[in-house]
Image: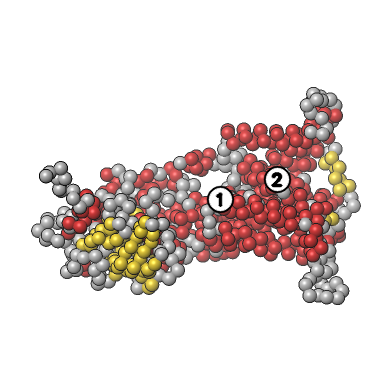
Amino acid sequence: MSADVPSAGATPAGGPLAGLAYEPGVKKPDPILIADGLRRSFGGLVAVDVDHVEFQRGCITALIGPNGAGKTTFFNLITGFDRPDAGGWEFDGKPVGKANPYRLARAGMVRTFQLTKSLTRLSVLENMKLGALDQRGESVFAGLIRPMWSQQEKEIEQKADALLERFKLGHMRSEFAGNLSGGQRKLLEMARALMADPKLIMLDEPMAGVNPALTQSLLGHVKDLRAEGRSVIFVEHDMDVVHDISDWVVVMAEGRVLAEGPPASIGANQDVIDAYLGTHHDLDLGAP
Amino acid sequence: MNWPLIISNTLFTAIGVQAIAFILAAIGVNMHFGYTGLLNFGQAAFAAIGAYTFAILAGTGIPWPGSGDGPGFFENPWPWWAAALAVLPMATFLALLLGVPTLRLRADYLAIVTIAAAEILRQALIAPKLDERFNTGGADGLQGFSSGIEGINPWNGQEFRLWKQPFDGHQAFVILVGWILIAVCSALVWLLMRSPWGRVLKSIREDEDAARSLGKNVFAYKMQSLVIGGIVGALGGMVFAIGGRAAAPNDYSTAFTFFAWTLLILGGAGRIKGPIVGGLIFWLIIGFTEVFLSQATRNALLPGWRVNENNFGLLRFMFVGLGLAALVVFRPQGIFGDRREQAFDVR
């Protein structure tokens, strides 16, 4: 924990996270998500084995780690797309009992996917409208009778258009989502997640496969989410991105939480360096 | 060659009872596959449920367990409308039975289970034991259950003619009611698919994990789709049985399902008019090749050592198969499909 390493991005530990110890499982003042004893194995491989980790509300937390560290499995568990062998977690103060993805989404936790899941044969606008929660017209009987949902539909469309403008996709609104470029699909997925007004957005590699020009605008959008008071957890490999936008970094390796701390503290952490590069990376094994 | 007969016979086939039944079945498959992406290869089971529910209840009624002496309410033939209404809960029940164990699994499992279920149901309908208990009629099937429909038919006993093609008042009535059913079902599907409910269904077709991540209860929507499409398919089977005045187990073999699929693909899946246009074209081709080949063999226009009156019936399916193959190659989206939509599938 060398404090003399110059900070590359955010302050070493600013805002609500100031003064916390840089150690795995440290208690946060106002956590939105707490995972406890979460464990998932595939056959003999333990993919996730997290004792305790907390994520602060209103902050951008990066989840990093070498390939195979269990980041995506952890994401899948938290969002209900996979079931843990043991352990549980708490979202927004409530323990998550039956982890159905759709229930978690309705509770305010919306995720995106590493491989974008834009619904290619729906228009961009329909993609957006789908994201809105509590639609009366989504029940089969109300759906038959237009007056029961047309007013709400209008409001949803306005909200969708506003978000599309903000994400610079307004000109594409009536295109099929399949016509969008890879980066635009990432933008659409993020915008669509916002239609649900989530408290917590989980972004799985939001910058993967996005060209550098678009990365900047995506980063801006993620920062805007924090400015709106939402919490963000994202998986990312690009350390520049992590330094730029995250308030706190959680490092995973071999399924466990290896280290925690503000971005500046992570680069200097010997455990993290070992996990990424191997324990003996700086030894000359050929030397006598 | 009797061209007036060929033409009028072909036209009659295209709008006839069989065409109506398969169009209804295809509207159901369109709900399942075209809009929700469910691979239901057991539409014949829904059609059979529709046909047999109506045939058993309107024909004989069913023996009710525990009603010991003498025929009670259920043991008498039901009025036609009650028998027809009973088709709805029966089709719903079959959909739940198929859907509960399979809809949580990957799409191909539904295909396997539905195709097996349809065959199980058909074999069960042949079984003598089931005949003893529920009057299913065994391998011969059931007849004589359409008297209720004949009773309300204003044209009963009359003879009609479509140019050279004669048909009776019963057929005329079933065809009229059948096309009204097609119109009503298509309108319902259209109303549903323009609603937010339909949007969720399409999103499940595209990627059910994405729909889940946006707070949609995918299982419930798939089940609703399976029930609605199943009911429409059961109505198709009911029309088929009433129109032919018979319900026989072998009418509901896998061929029934594949015909329904064929004409849906022909017309374009995911389109309201897909099943209707596909059905008209499919039965135009079937009807024309049948009557044309029959006439041609009779007039010795075809080489007799290849085509005779015993095997020309098979030839017409070869023509349909060729046509379908050509369609898939040159117009994979079907006649009414949107090429742009189709193109994304390959990515």
Q: Earlier in the sequence, mark 1 or mark 2?
A: 1
- Residue in the image at 58% along x and 54% along y: B110
Q: The numbered mark 2 sits on a residue in which chain?
A: B
From where the camera sits, is residue B232 visible? no
At label 2, the amino acid type is Ala
**Residue A40 appears at what percent x and percent y?**
38, 61
Query: Is B231 on the left-hand or right-hand side of B125?
Result: left
**Residue B182 appears at what percent x and percent y?**
69, 52
Report the quarter where the C terminus of chain A lies: top left
* Viewer-proximal residue among A274 and B319: A274
Q: How is the image coloured?
A: secondary structure
Residue extending furthest toward the front = A288
Q: The numbered mark 1 sits on a residue in which chain?
A: B
- Residue in the image at 66% along x and 63% along y: B93
Q: Is residue B323 above or below residue A10?
A: above
Number of numbered callouts drawn: 2
* Viewer-proximal residue among B216 and A77: A77
The crowd level at tag 1 (other Cα within 10 Å; few <14, some 14-19, many 20+) is few
* Viewer-proximal residue among B113 and A18: B113
At label 1, the amino acid type is Asp
**Residue B311 appears at what percent x and percent y?**
79, 33
The residue labelled by disc 1 is: B108
The residue labelled by disc 2 is: B255
Describe the element under mark 1 as helix, strand or loop. helix
Query: Is B204 on the left-hand or right-hand side of A84?
Result: right
**Residue A39 appears at what percent x and percent y?**
36, 64
